[in-house]
Image (cartoon, rainbow, N blue to C red):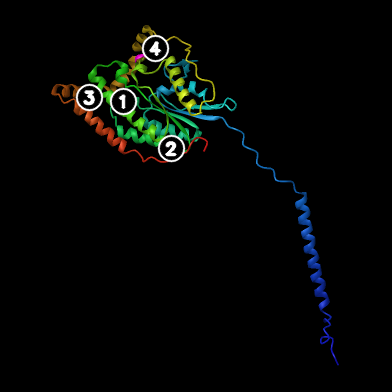
Amino acid sequence: MTTEAERGTPPADAAPDQERHQERHQERRQERHEIRDQAQLAPDPVPDAPAPPRALRYAALGDSLTAGIGDPVDGGWRGWAALLGAGVGDPGTGVRFHNFAVSGALTRDVEEKQTPAALAFAPDLASVVVGVNDTLRRAFDIQDLALRLDRACGALAAHGTVLLTTCLPDPGRMLGLPAPLALPLARRQRAVNAVVHALAARYDTVHLHMAEASWVADRSLWSADRLHPAERGHRMIAARFYALLAERGLALGPEPSLAADQPPPSRAATLRWLATSGTGWVARRCRDLLPELLRLAGDEVTHWARGTGARLDLHAELALSRALAALSPGAPLARMGE
């Protein structure tokens, strides 16, 4: 007698298993249909809209030259950096300009105070013009100045900021000091300019030469104190920087005008400054610089008398060589907009 199992007939309890299998199969089919329907109903993804263009950011770092001393306007100071700021960037987006420069600032101040503030501003463009006040201080150290200026420029350039730099005339010649007093200051300013030239090459800055004789000789460019540009001088600096920026395609706004709003300082104004503000300026410098400058002048006269004046130039060259050797190695730099 053949049993149901022997004839291949499924046992009675197999029916519920088949039903459960069919139910699961039906559920999976339903899930696939729902997923397909949802995909058909979902809208196509919208590509991210391009970010609106932002205004170019320009930060000015430095001392009284960049702060605008010599270019009075509306009870304050304007200066070349503000004049230049109106001409850089796209007219459609405008320019955000912030002047961090402070009268009397040293290279130390630019590195320790102004550079961190400028980095927080995230500038696309930054001018770094400083050094003259360092030459007018007793504790002048070209290597310390070089390292501080290198760190400031390096920090800004590492964030893709395009830098503006310039070399400057020595204050001794500007003030018309006697040779024993002027020569030590000239050596110091030449050393500062050599450092600036080295950093300008390293960081590919937009560099302006302002130490040539023609710039110094035109007295109409300078204010009554003989150290800061007058309005016409500030306008000249702005226009010359604008031309250099335009060559790189970084000046898209209106070119700064050379037409001054005020006449150059008269001789009476110069004498009036010397009798008022100039007296205070000289007194402040006398406490710090004059004793050292007199010592330097004494060394100058002594070496002249001995016929060994070349030694002073040699000492200055050796100090400059050590300063340049201490600068950080060059490295590839980011470009504005990258």
For the N terminus, give its image quadrant: bottom right
Q: Describe the element under mark 4 as helix, strand or loop.
A: helix
Give the labeled residue for mark 2.
155
Give the labeled residue for mark 4.
220
Three-letter amino acid code of the residue under disc 1:
Gln
Query: Do tag 1 and tag 3 residues touch (Cβ < 8 Å)?
Result: no
Give the labeled residue for mark 3.
296
Three-letter amino acid code of the residue under disc 4:
Ser
- Give the residue drawn at x 23%, y 28%: 313
CA–CA distance in space, label 1 to label 2: 24 Å
Q: Earlier in the sequence, mark 3 or mark 4?
A: 4
Q: Say if residue 137 shows up in the picture.
A: no
Q: Is residue 220 magenta?
A: yes
Q: Earlier in the sequence, mark 1 or mark 3?
A: 1
Q: Is residue 41 above or below residue 10?
A: above
Question: Which residue occupies the foreground of this view, 249 or 179?
Answer: 249
